[in-house]
Image (cartoon, rainbow, N blue to C red):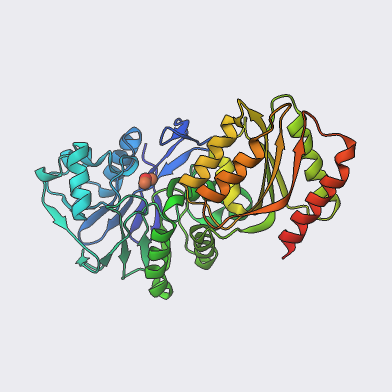
């Protein structure tokens, strides 16, 4: 059965939702699913913007059959060839023998590498500033390398103001009938998954996002719709989402608050983390989020680290090292280029307590533009009430720093 939605007068969402995939990119949990968005323009010529993951190919074909109703598909624009969008390409080529493909030179190389056989059809290589008319609609192509792969471009329809933004402005969460951001409570139900998507998938490439935002900023007054390859279409309050993307890609925190992440084997480091959280809240700093590093997938930790201005790492010493899962979190922060945060450290060890000095070394030597507060806590096996003053001092230092 087809499942399509109208975006504008002659533009349709023809993508699909996926609730079966557990791990996006085989790494990131997606408990609320994901959508693969593709769009069909019914102009004098017909144009498909991107395809979908192979698992959703049948849905795409049914959607196209329904809307085309016997018309041919004339053009296929590939903004991003990664297989969650490009994998159904060959099937489209097989079904529509006259379709011409528009994409960047690098994208055609990648299509060949993946075995999608673009050369069975006419391949039109485009670069920044090139335009193409399909009848009423004229589009222009804008290079967006490393948002999220090097071949990426975005396409702007100058006729109706639609920006086909590839992975940019995307999100986890299946659409399930909704299409537009103004059909959901985005700030309540979607923002966390949008941030988790952006920070984990494209977080490393902040500069590339900034460069795309700059180009989009130049035509901001002309952009009426943002159509990403995952998640909701934006047609209202575009500035809200631009602002979020701007903050995330500049590695600026969204919230002045404290994220506390603990690594605890027998509950004692956890107890210290909870005691600190209580102190912060008691003193009026209630923007506090506490996570057990051992049972929270690192993609959620990364997302929260991008959200909050301050991060407390509380780790037991393990084999004279940082607890391995906490170490993994630090490595992920480095991989995703997180910057401009203030840290405080809590270390624990029954003998040869080393996790604090090792975490400090990692933060100062491996991460960029980070500050580590002098105030911290050292625990010998378990925290005792004699350390209440130290706890207060740490909480006060964090609050002072948050309020700066
Ligand atoms: Fe959704 Fe970079 O692919």
Can you give x and y, in whole percent of width and height, for residue 366 in the image? 50, 47
Can you give x and y, in whole percent of width and height, for residue 135 in the image? 21, 66
State which quadrant residue 137 falls in.
bottom left
State which quadrant residue 161 falls in.
bottom left
Identified at 14% across, 56% down, the residue is: 124
Q: Nearer the viewer, residue 340 or 185?
A: 340
Identified at 71% across, 52% down, the residue is: 374
Q: Which residue lies furthest to the front in this view?
A: 352
Q: In the rendered view, tell whether residue 318 sits above or below residue 375.
A: above
**Left or right of 336, for residue 130:** left
Identified at 18% across, 48% down, the residue is: 108
**Left or right of 309, for residue 212:** left
Q: In the rendered view, tell whether residue 9 sits above or below residue 35.
A: below
Identified at 52% across, 55% down, the residue is: 368
Q: Residue furthest right?
A: 385
Q: Which of 337 and 210 is in front in this view?
A: 337
Can you give x and y, in whole percent of width and height, for residue 214 in the image? 40, 69
The answer, for residue 154, to whether it is visible in the render is yes
Total marks shown come to 0
Q: Nearer the viewer, residue 66 or 391?
A: 391
Of the 4 image quadrants, the one containing the N terminus is: top left
**Left or right of 91, for residue 372:** right
Of the 4 image quadrants, the one containing the C terminus is: bottom right
**Left or right of 276, for residue 219:** left
Can you give x and y, in whole percent of width and height, for residue 41 in the image? 29, 57
């Amino acid at each position: 059965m087809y499942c399509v939605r109208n975006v504008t007068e002659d533009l349709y969402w023809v993508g699909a939702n996926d609730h079966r995939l557990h791990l996006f990119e085989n790494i990131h949990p997606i408990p609320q699913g994901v959508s693969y968005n593709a769009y069909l323009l019914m102009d004098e010529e017909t144009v498909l913007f991107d395809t979908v993951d192979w698992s959703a190919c049948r849905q795409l074909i049914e959607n196209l059959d329904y809307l085309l109703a016997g018309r041919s598909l004339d053009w296929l624009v590939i903004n991003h060839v990664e297989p969650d969008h490009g994998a159904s390409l060959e099937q489209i080529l097989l079904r529509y023998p006259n379709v011409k493909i528009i994409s960047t030179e690098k994208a055609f190389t990648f299509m060949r590498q993946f075995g999608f056989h673009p050369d069975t059809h006419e391949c039109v290589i485009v670069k920044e500033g090139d335009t193409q008319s399909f009848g009423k609609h004229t589009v222009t192509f804008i290079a967006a390398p490393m948002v999220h792969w090097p071949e990426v471009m975005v396409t702007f329809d100058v006729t109706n103001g639609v920006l086909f933004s590839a992975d940019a402005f995307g999100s986890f969460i299946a659409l399930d009938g909704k299409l537009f951001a103004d059909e959901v409570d985005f700030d309540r139900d979607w923002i966390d998954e949008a941030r988790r998507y952006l920070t984990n998938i494209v977080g490393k490439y902040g500069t590339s996002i900034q460069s795309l935002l700059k180009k989009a900023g130049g035509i901001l007054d002309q952009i009426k719709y943002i159509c990403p390859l995952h998640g909701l279409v934006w047609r209202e309050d575009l500035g809200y989402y631009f602002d979020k993307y701007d903050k995330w890609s500049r590695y600026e925190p969204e919230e002045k608050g404290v994220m506390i992440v603990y690594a605890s084997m027998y509950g004692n480091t956890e107890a210290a983390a909870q005691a600190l959280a209580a102190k912060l809240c008691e003193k009026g700093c209630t923007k506090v989020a506490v996570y057990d590093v051992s049972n929270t997938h690192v993609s959620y930790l990364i997302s929260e680290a991008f959200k909050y201005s301050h991060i407390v790492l509380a780790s037991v010493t393990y084999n004279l090292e940082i607890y391995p899962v906490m170490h993994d979190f630090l490595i992920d922060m480095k991989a995703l280029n997180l910057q401009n945060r203030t840290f405080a450290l809590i270390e624990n060890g029954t003998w040869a307590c080393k996790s604090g000095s090792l975490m400090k070394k990692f933060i100062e030597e491996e991460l960029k533009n980070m500050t580590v507060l002098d105030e911290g806590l050292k625990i010998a096996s378990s925290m005792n009430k004699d350390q209440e003053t130290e706890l207060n001092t740490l909480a006060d230092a964090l609050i002072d720093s948050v309020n700066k």
